[in-house]
Image (cartoon, helix red, strand yellow):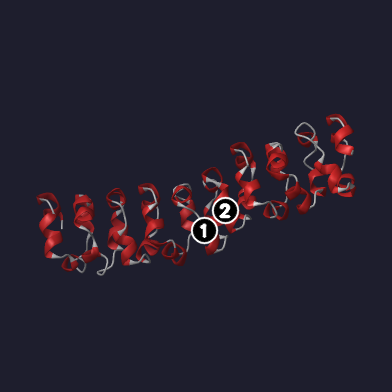
Amino acid sequence: MLGGICAAPHVRKLGSADLAGLPSADILAFGSTQLPALTAATLAGLATAELVALGTAGIAAFTPAQLAALSTTQLFGLTTAQVKALTTAQVIALSTTQLASFGTAQAQALGSAGIARLGSADLAGPPSADILVFGSTHLSAPTAAALAGLATAELVALGTAGIAAFTPAQLAALSTVQLFGLTTAQVVALTTANIFALTTAEIVALTTADIPALTTNQIMALTTAECAAFTSSQIPAFTDLQLGVMNTAQMSAL
């Protein structure tokens, strides 16, 4: 077995063509000392099946630079267990293009460290199915700016639990078009902290169907600036119960 007899210095001399010509059994024999010795360019010779056969321990043995050298095709071929086994340093080394190439199950296994590095263009790229697998931990990971890449249909597809998982900063970063596109049920699901964080422009984007559905806790969370932002066409949508829980400052601001 070649892997059992080659020391790291010899492994470094292997080119991509050499690695592509080795039987899988030889490559699999490379241990945690030998795998990091492969040059980044050499790794291009590894077939997807060979990467998969290395298992979680093999992938974890790669240096961040080696992982960053893998093609999107190679990365897409990794198992969910291998993706989950990636270290934070390895994930950080991946480009946003590589991160966006992961499939649905892989995205779910990726973790917050990887998702947090996606930009707006990357978040707009994956299919809705990939975005929908992000759990509450994952959804709070994208930066506020990155959320600009989400289409209204994708936001709606996240449901009430998905929207409730957004941080106040993330929700405040949504455009008025995105907020206007939310369902009434999603608006009602917003936490009081999220309601408090809404910009005046986002307040104006609330529909006359959204407003009477707001809970009394959400109403009490409104700032005076937010109350002042409601338009003359929105104010009549408030119910008597909602107006009754407003404090003097909120009522004066309407």
The residue under the point 73% across, 50% down is: 52
Q: Does the residue at mark 1 contact the one at mark 2 (Cβ under 8 Å)?
A: yes
Residue beneath disc 1: 131
Q: Which amino acid does label 1 sit on?
A: Ile
Q: Quadrant of the C terminus?
A: bottom left
Quadrant assignment, res 90 = top right
Give percent across and percent down for residue 43.
79, 44
Pick whichever, 159 or 39, lies toward us: 159
Give percent across and percent down for residue 29.
82, 39
Residue beneath disc 2: 107
Q: Earlier in the sequence, mark 1 or mark 2?
A: 2
Q: In which quarter of the image is the N terminus?
A: top right
Q: What residue type is labelled 2?
A: Ala
Give percent across and percent down for residue 54.
75, 44
The residue under the point 70% across, 54% down is: 77
Q: How far apart are marks 1 and 2 (CA)?
A: 8 Å
For the residue carrying disc 1, how many other residues have a C-alpha within 10 Å: few (<14), some (14-19), or many (20+)? Answer: many
Pick whichever, 77 or 226, lies toward us: 77
Relative side of 184 to 90, left or right: left
Mark 2 lies on a secondary structure that is helix
